[in-house]
Image (cartoon, grey):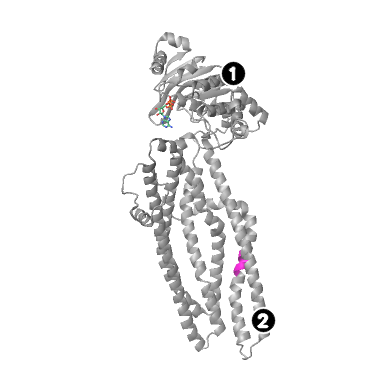
Amino acid sequence: MSSSNKELKDRIKNASENGKKERFIYQDDDAIEKPFNWSQMRRLFIYMKPYTRQLIPVIVAMIIGTITRLTIPALTIVAIDQAIQPASGETSYGKLYLVAGIMVALFIIQWASNQYRIKYTNIIGQKVIYDLRHHLFQHIQKLSFRFYDKRPAGSVLVRVTNDVNALQDLFTNGVVNSLMDCVQLAGIVIILLIWNFKLGLAVMITVPIMFLVSSALRKRIRFAWQDVRKKQSRINSHLNESIQGMKITQAYVQEKENMRFFDNMNAVNVKAWNKASALNQTFGPVIEVTSAIGTFILFWYGSYLIEHQEITVGLLVGFANYVGNFWDPINRLGQVYNQLLVAMASSERIFEFIDEEPTVGELEYAKPLASIRGDVQFDNIVFEYEKGRPALHGISINVKAGQSIALVGHTGSGKSTIINLLCRFYDPVSGVVRIDGQDIRNITLDSLRSQVGLVMQDTFIFSGTIRDNIRYGCLNATDNEIVEAAKAVNAHDFIMSLPDGYDTEVEERGNVLSMGQRQLLSFARALLADPRVLILDEATASIDTETELKIQEALKTLLKGRTSFMIAHRLSTIRNADEIIVLDHGRIVEQGNHEALIRKNGVYNGLIEAQYRFLSA
Ligand SMILES: Nc1ncnc2c1ncn2[C@@H]1O[C@H](COP(=O)(O)OP(=O)(O)OP(=O)(O)O)[C@@H](O)[C@H]1O
């Protein structure tokens, strides 16, 4: 539904960031202005270093292009003063044709060198952007959970997309073009001053005035565009959140409220854009007025000099040509300066992520762990997510290879935290987690995590085929092995009932699959990975009894011969566990098998009874 023109106008006019206290709060990621910073600039240019050799021919092309551009006006003088109006008084057509021929040749050379320069600056620029984005993504993949705990996904996304994009103009055009503009400007200034010092100086008198006016204006324009980017970045963050939370929005019938919020953001963005573009438009007239003043001075003082026979008509025409070429590079250099300041803010945010060290780092002497047996030991573990708020207080658990352990307890009691420490998503504040007797901090992360399989509460399905999703467990598995794994966990039948079987495309997060189906897929994925230690986080929650039976069967296959940790709120699913660990507020309050804990008639028994009462109510 589109709004009427008037409605839209009013909405944009009344759009406000601070008018009403909003539900959603987005931290402003964008620092509005960063001063020019050489060391950051150097760091940015390191990304160009691998392409130095490819840049040389581009710079040569740039120099050829600039020289030809500077030569052409000079030929005009020759044409006028020596061919059309020579001192002898007789027009020399031969000379005129020759000069015209040379001019055409120079135009062709200029065109060809420009084409080459534009093509290759773009190619090199894109490669640099590719490398930067690659480096950034590679790094953020290594960052620990603590990093992601503090940041909304949207803000990380914006850095990899918008902030890297903001550097695109600088790398694709900015660097080489500004070099070219500097050479061209210097060339023009030198030529004008050599040809006629007084006229040259008179023409350039407007430059400082223009410089002052334009830098003041540019500053305002720059702020206005940065404000637009800030608004766009908020839209991105909100969009990301809205799409992820679409189900909840629809379930709570919050579409209208969401729309109102989005419309306001959208209108704030248009308002900012209108302001920036209106300011931008004021820039053109400033350049035009200054160049008009420059041209007026040129012709006024130039004719005076001709009258006094200090210069020729040809020289005045040549001057006019050069002066015409003078304002463009000045204008462009100003733009590059703007790009540079935008790049400063963006690169600072990019480097802030790149400089972030993973809190769970790999020690220098960490060794790869050869295939493990599966003994696991938590030795007096204390852990806190936030300083001073312990989530685990001195947890000790001893697990023999092949045993199955169930973690139970009220919400927030610390079950997932124990699992997080076993996968080394976090390191404990004190105490040691050991696998086969080795402190897991002394083992390389790859070798640890490739042998500890994780089936998460919220099974993550990636965009791609069912086959790809199972293969995620072991990238070099054959198609046959994938089918075998699916069969072993009772997933084969439902996969075959899908339109394209194993080749059925599923979207991100697997929205076309049911919870139970997603879980079976993640079991197949885990089975294929064949880890010695397997973690199942509430894997059997919220599914129907028939699927649960299938899953129970699948679990038996999956758990066979492995050490397993299972978190299940449905206590019926953990009856057979070798050891049940009951947690409360980060402490172990009971421990033993099902029968022993029932006999004890303590916390576990209370949980079982509460669940029984709930189910039979
Ligand atoms: N990323 C985090 N940052 C800060 N505190 C956290 C974080 N994750 C968990 N906590 C806190 O740590 C404590 C233990 O949480 P944990 O997720 O281990 O509980 P749980 O037993 O798995 O709960 P549930 O059954 O609801 O999943 C809770 O008080 C929780 O608020």
Q: Which residue is mark 1?
A: 560
* Depicted 112 relative to depicted 496: above or below: below
**Residue that mark 2 sits on:** 97
Please say whether residue 37 is visible from this viewpoint: no
> Which residue does the image show at 40% across and 67% down from the upper left?
213
Q: Residue at x 61, y 55 (%)?
A: 123
Towards the viewer: 201 or 496: 496
| Residue type at numbered disc 2 | Tyr
Q: Nearer the viewer, residue 229 or 540?
A: 540
Q: Quadrant of ligand 1?
A: top left
- Say left or right for 342 vs 14: right
Measured from the top left, where is residue 33 in percent x and y?
42, 54
Q: Amino acid at mark 1?
A: Lys
Question: Label 2 neighbourhood size at 10 Å, few (<14), some (14-19), many (20+)?
Answer: few
Element type at marker 2? Answer: helix
Q: Which residues are magenta?
A: 62-66
Picture quarter containing residue 191?
A: bottom right
- Looking at the image, which is closer to me, 318 or 108? 108
Main secondary structure type of the part rendered in magenta: helix
Q: How many marks?
A: 2
Q: Quadrant of the C terminus?
A: top left
Asked whether the viewer can see residue 173, the reply is yes
Question: Which badge, 1 or 2, is on the more N-terminal residue?
Answer: 2
Q: Position of residue 343 (x, y in %)?
A: 49, 54
State which quadrant residue 413 falls in: top left
Residue at the spot x=56%, y=71% of the render? 187
